[in-house]
Image (cartoon, grey):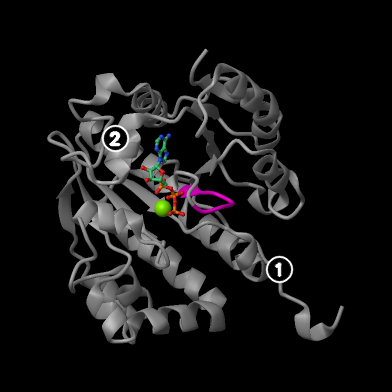
Amino acid sequence: MLPLFKKREWLEEPWKDYKIIGFGSTKGGAGRTTMAIEIGSTIAFVKETKVVIVDWDVVNPRLTQRAFRSLPLRGQTLVKIISSKDFSRALKNISLHSVSLSPTAKIDVLPALSYEDIDKGIVDEYFSFMYEKPEEYVRRSRELIRVLKEDYEYILNDYPAITWVALGHLSLSINHVRATSGNLVMVVDPSPWSAELLNTDLIYPKLKGMKVGALVVNMVKPTVDAINQAKTIFEPICRKLGADNFVVIPFDAKLYEAGIGALNFVSVAVSPHKGASRSARYLYVLADRFLHEEKRGRCFYIGPG
Ligand SMILES: Nc1ncnc2c1ncn2[C@@H]1O[C@H](COP(=O)(O)OP(=O)(O)OP(=O)(O)O)[C@@H](O)[C@H]1O
Ligand SMILES: [Mg+2]
């Protein structure tokens, strides 16, 4: 290998705090944002405590768009804080908007970006900073979490996907996750390729020492056979990851409608539609187990059957 391509490998120390929950996946569209919204709103509702969701997905800021019904025009955003010329001052001035995700749950959201950030080139600055100074980027990210932790009991991180395209920066993606979470929820689609990718030495050793709160298999096809197949394929992977919970979420009309903005509220698990959505009920159970830091047994099964 040419020395030019030799990447420095390092492993960040993960947070020893299961109340800092990160939602990651190896591909886009797996359902991270949906899980973050349902779990975050449930925690805010059940515990009546302060919860913040940070939208780290600057490329595809669906959480920001869902929470604010659009990208904000301006104001405090993740890209502004992280790429700020005066980072310590930016950290001192954080004050976030509270957003109603349902009639019963309010949480604070740190939006990924605003229209102003695109217009003024702040998004470009953010990406240059991330790629040119990866370690500094990770350090600032950890600092941001530390400051948020002074105000919030629970922090939820909605991350971008660790995709093949980002493989050149796999260390960056994973170290970023390690530096900003203490409880990782891995969301996957049920394809064997997702299983294979999770199983390789590309990702698994880099999760060493991280608490994995759940492996969530989010399914498009809810046939009984497909569910059983997913259980067979992913259960061993769940054990290998040492995850506390193994969750199977079938396709669900209400979750889908919330995702495309067809409902009046964003979260289903704490809305009047809760009863109509079995998947939201499963996610409620998972949130409840997180609240009690329930970890009896490994890969506690939540899902159909
Ligand atoms: N179990 C499900 N049942 C029905 N629809 C779902 C389910 N999970 C996710 N969806 C829908 O699929 C779409 C993608 O989900 P989501 O945005 O949560 O994924 P993501 O992993 O965050 O994707 P992205 O890579 O776009 O950030 C959304 O419209 C969402 O509402
Ligand atoms: Mg998303």
Residue in the image at 67% along x and 48% along y: 208
Q: Position of residue 289 (x, y in %)?
A: 41, 26
Residue in the image at 22% along x and 61% along y: 70
**Residue 136 falls left or right of residue 82:** right
Q: Quadrant of the N terminus?
A: bottom right
In this rendering, the count of numbered labels is: 2
Q: Which residues are magenta?
A: 23-28
Residue of label 1: 9
Which mark, residue 263? none
Residue in the image at 44% along x and 64% along y: 142
Task: Tell which of 95 and 217 is nearer to you.
Answer: 217
Q: Judging from the image, what secondary structure is the residue with disc 2 in?
A: helix
Residue in the image at 27% along x and 60% along y: 110
Can you tell which quarter of the image residue 217 is in?
A: top right
Is the residue 75 above or below the residue 201 in the image?
A: below
Q: Position of residue 52 (x, y in %)?
A: 28, 51
Task: Tell which of 219 and 41 is nearer to you.
Answer: 219
Amino acid type, mark 1: Glu
User: Is 295 part of what is drawn in magenta?
Assistant: no
Is the residue 215 above or below the residue 77 in the image?
A: above
**Residue that lies at the very extreme toward the top in this rendered image:** 305
Amino acid type, mark 2: Ile
**Residue that lies at the very extreme toward the left in this rendered image:** 103
Residue of label 2: 43
**Residue 64 falls left or right of residue 129:** left
Can you tell which quarter of the image residue 87 is in?
A: bottom left
Q: Position of residue 125 (x, y in %)?
A: 40, 84
Residue 89 seen in render: no
Upstream in sequence: badge 1 or badge 2:
1
